[in-house]
Amino acid sequence: MTMSPVEQVRWQCDVAWSLLDYHLRRLTADDFLWEPGPLVWTMHPTADGGWRPDWADTEPEPVPVPTIGWLSWHLGWWWSTARDHALGRTPPAREEVRWPGPGEPTVAWLRSLREDWTNVLDGADEADLAAPVAFPWPADAGQTRAHLLAWVTVELTKNASEIGQLRLLRAAAR
């Protein structure tokens, strides 16, 4: 069976999601803020009951190890931004993307973003793939919607492996 380019992207995204979902189903709320070492990027409670991520506009050296909480916020931030770009909407600023907190609230948030992205893919056709996009690249980079759709799968796979590795390390350390 020959798949269209959109069907291939959808299939790849489903595979990447299954890799992440394997770990999401096994996470506990305590896993999200576990710090695997002394130098980490994590999430910090705010006075208003929200959460603030560690962030630097220029990546520090050495690079801090992100916690599962930070990775899940980062995943939610870039995925919601990619979704909004794919739909022609203005995404919120990074500082406006709210992390729901450790445990099931964040898992539910990521699952809703996956559903949103599935709807983006289901609504795409081959004619859409050549349309120019300016995320996550500069507007003049010449990238297309096909690049964006493929990048999401790569980024999702990377985040799945990072979250999975941290979950496995924590489980092994208990």
Image (tube, rainbow, N blue to C red):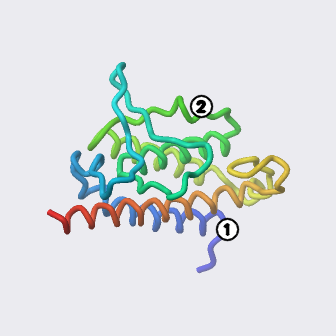
Residue 92 got which mark? 2
Q: Quadrant of residue 10?
A: bottom right
Residue at the image position 48 percent from the left and 49 percent from the top: 75
Give residue 115's position: percent from left, percent from top: 46, 47
Say what secondary structure mark 1 lies in.
helix
> Image quarter for residue 5?
bottom right
Can you say which quadrant of the picture contains the C terminus? bottom left
- Say which residue appears at 39% left-offset and 53% top-offset: 39
Q: Residue 18's quadrant in the figure?
A: bottom left
Expressed as whole percent of the image width and height from the top left, the position of residue 109 reads: 39, 41
Asked whether, in this view, residue 45 is left or right of residue 89, the answer is left
As drawn, the label of residue 117 is none
Question: Which of the image's four quarters has the N terminus?
Answer: bottom right
Give the left or right position of residue 135, taking residue 12 as reference. Answer: right
Q: Position of residue 153 (x, y in %)?
A: 55, 62
Mark 2 or 1, which is nearer the eye?
Answer: 2
Task: Decide which of 171, 2 is in the foreground and name it.
Answer: 171
- Count neighbours of disc 2 (C-alpha within 10 A) and say few if under 14, some if 14 to 19, many if 20 or more: few
Residue lying farthest top?
48
Q: In the rendered structure, which amino acid carries the disc numbered 1?
A: Pro
Q: CA distance from mark 2 to mark 1?
A: 29 Å
**Earlier-in-chain disc, 2 versus 1:** 1
Tag 2: amino acid: Pro
On screen, residue 130 versus residue 115, left or right, reads right
Q: Is disc 2 placed on a helix, strand or loop?
A: loop
Give the number of the disc on residue 5. Answer: 1
